[in-house]
Amino acid sequence: MYCAKCGALLPDDAMFCSKCGAKVSGDLPVDSAVPVSTTAAPTGTRGEDAYMEGWKYMNVTHEYDKGVKLYTEAINLGCANMEDAYFSRGVAYSRELG
């Protein structure tokens, strides 16, 4: 199952998201192909918002060029999950190139 707040993949028995700490609702389908929510909840920082927007463009709309730009913005703004931002930017860039 996926976290409805940040889209992280979670174990079936999770009560809270290990990435963002959100409480996991028990009524979410276990085998969802995509997270329930495709829009990120505001996190309070521009870096985190850019990271979540990049995630949306990469995983929902598959607009990899926009994902690369937003992950770069998140990195430049110093988002909290910097390692993930660098990794995701690399994946988005490789998918953009085909």
Image: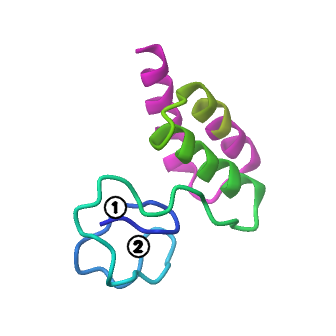
Q: Tell me where residue 29 sits by quadrant.
A: bottom left
User: What amino acid is labelled 2 in the image?
Assistant: Ser
Q: Residues within 10 Å of mark 2 (few under 14, many from 20)?
A: some
Quarter of the picture holding the C terminus: top left
The disc, 1 or 2, on the residue closer to the chain's N-terminal end is 1
Figure disc tally: 2
Q: Which mark is residue 18?
A: 2
Give me the residue at 75% from left, 68% from top.
44
Between circles 1 and 2, the one closer to the viewer is: 1
> Where residue 90 appears, x then y in whole percent?
48, 30
- Rendered view: 82 above or below 22: above
User: What amino acid is labelled 1 in the image?
Assistant: Leu
In the image, the segment drawn in magenta is: 71-98
Quarter of the picture holding the N terminus: bottom left
Of residue 31 and residue 11, the one placed in the foreground of this image is 31
> Where residue 46 appears, x then y in whole percent?
77, 55
Q: Which mark is residue 9?
A: 1
Q: Is residue 54 left or right of residue 30?
A: right
> Where residue 40 appears, x then y in whole percent?
60, 60
Rounded to the nearest angstrom, the CA distance separating label 1 from label 2 is 9 Å
Q: Is residue 29 left or right of residue 89?
A: left
Give me the residue at 76% from left, 48% from top.
77
Scheme by which the image is coloured:
rainbow
